[in-house]
Amino acid sequence: MAIKNELSILTKAEQLDLYSPPLLSLEQQRLYFTPNEIELTESKSIRLRNHRCYFIALLGYFKSKPVILSPSFNLIFDDMQFISTQVQGGKGIRPFSINKMQRDRIYQRILRLLNYQKWDESLHFAPLYDHLVMVGKAWLEPRYLFDAAAESLATHRIAIPKYTVLQKLISRVIQQVKKGLNNKLRIHVSSELHEFLNTIIDDKDGLSLSQLRAGAKSVMVTELKKELIVYHQLQPYTRQIDDAVKDLALSSKNQQHFGEMVDYYGSKLKRFKRPQQHLWLLCFLTQRIRQSLERLTDGFIHHIRKQQEAAHAFAQQAVFDSWRSAADNVTKAAELLHLFVDDSIDDNQPFATVRQQALSVMNNQDIETLCLYLKKQKRTVEEYQWQYYDDQNTLLEQLLRPVFLCLECQAGKGSEVLVTQLRTTKTELLAGNTLQTMDSTLIQQKHRPWLLNNDVVHPQRYEWLLYRQLASRLNGRIYLSNVTKYRALEDDLIASSIQSDLLASSTLEKLKQPIQKLLQVKQIRLATSLEDVARHIDNGDNRNVIMKSRSGARWRLPVKGSRSFVNNPFFKQMIPVSIADVLRYVEQETNFMQCFAHVLPIQKQVGANQDDLLAILIANATHRGVYGMAQISDRSYEHLSTIQANYIRPETLQEA
């Protein structure tokens, strides 16, 4: 069996759909096959009636899609019968055949009427080729290039040529773009980076392709440690990889497209030539480094929050246990008090000796707890929370700190002091030193008793405090410039220096217009359309609207008889909108959801439960109930019923 070395762009079904006559509904037949005065005059100049019908059919097909077709009579039998009976006003039409010369003459008439040109390779190939090369620098995906070619042909009013013509054209475009990239690779990629890429492809000692493709499967500590190993192996080459991709001037879509080739081919990557391998692998490594940092950051946030929850639970239990232990140790208080009246203890003995006897009865912490108990006081939850963090030194040193050292923090509004401290901390940790510079102003008042001792900051607890503040502010107050998910919006915007070049290369004319002029044109069109609609209603031309008052301020839709089950055509012109989206818009304009306050005033505001409240409101308004809503949504019945009990009350409904 011969191997076809053809570029696959469209599937067989897509080719058949594009290069075959369209299947038209009755409404579409009336739209495409009803000629205007100029077209009707042109059709009357054709002597044979069969050829006139065929002309109208091909004209309608070309209006539907600008492709030159050669359909047989049997293939378009229904359309020919419609044209013969409904358009030409005669009887049905019998089968006939038409030769290529006659069809070409008919298409000459069609192209002249619609101001189109037939594809001429000597005239149209070079401009389209240059345009697609430019488009290919944005995205070299074959289907995207095919669509861009069709769009360019439509813009210049050129009929779409045969599939094989576009196939060969796009193949040459892809080869040209890849050739240019390979030439840049030889110039901009260093020998050290070449050797590193070859090591990965050849699966020598070190980082393998299978390791790169695997990645962390979850945020478990073991998986994140594997991800750290991969990142640390890539980190020495990160700057070279980024510089090489930048010098190649690859768009984000091309980076994604080439990077996906590594996952697609896998171990079969070795079959391709070295330049191709290096290009794909560079793009893959760029994405892999970003993906690795994103996974590590997500894991960092997850474990910080998990430790906060665990510390709170531990502290609550510890407070209870200490209180119960103090109650059990009340009887030992008598032994401690007896030391003050014990005659066997000489008055000249040092206090340290008496203290040792007291500690033999109870340890230091139990004595402090007992004193608090006798004064009807408890140890604070914060104290036990920081004791819990002291026991998590392994997690801090083996996971959280290494991940933090991979991140590059960027200050948002109001976080400048914290980011300065984070950068200083990172510098000191990378130097292998303990924390020396610790800004005590970042310590909240409630944490000061546990982090400060005679104005000396506890280093490990301070590090935990910094990580907690970092994780809580990765919501737009602190950005990570090297993590796509958490970087600032400005980092994703196109540089203003290349904006004019991009607009000049665009085929969208509206983008090239000044925004004020474009808005002015749209405002005029909107005002004109509103005036036309109002005039049609006032004149009674719009049968879908009936005025209810002489002033013209109120109107209604016409009411049909009970026998009519067809929706009013007025509603067919309206785009269906979800009732939830309507309520969200009403909330945006009126803030009525703020009226639903929790039954307990100390609870959080309604924002956290807005979607749940919308579901409950819709469920009750449609008489479905929260149980019925739970059956068709991802919310559980218990969850919805709890929200309803806490927020939905007669007074909140009345206020809303």
Image (cartoon, helix red, strand yellow):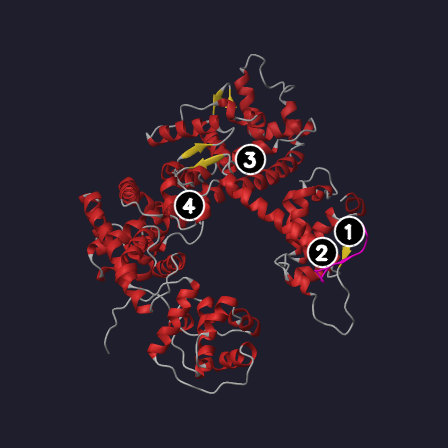
542 magenta-colored: yes
Please name the residue shown 46% across and 47% down the image: 510
Q: Which residue is mark 3?
A: 385
Q: CA distance from mark 2 to mark 4?
A: 57 Å
Residue range in magenta is 538-552
Q: Is residue 23 above or below residue 261?
A: below
User: If you read the primary sequence from the N terminus, does the residue marked by circle 2 or circle 4 appear first?
Assistant: 4
- Tag in front: 3 or 1: 1
Amino acid type at circle 1 is Gly
258 magenta-colored: no
Q: Report whether 630 appears left or right of 12.
A: right
Q: Which residue is mark 4?
A: 294
Please name the residue shown 40% across and 37% down the image: 481
Residue 537 tag number: 2
Residue 242 x %, y %:
30, 42
User: In front: 366, or 377?
Assistant: 377
Marks 3 and 1 close (CB-CB < 8 Å): no
Please name the residue shown 62% across and 22% down the image: 339
Q: Residue furthest top?
A: 348
Residue 552 tag number: 1
Amino acid type at circle 3 is Gln
User: In front: 190, or 38?
Assistant: 38
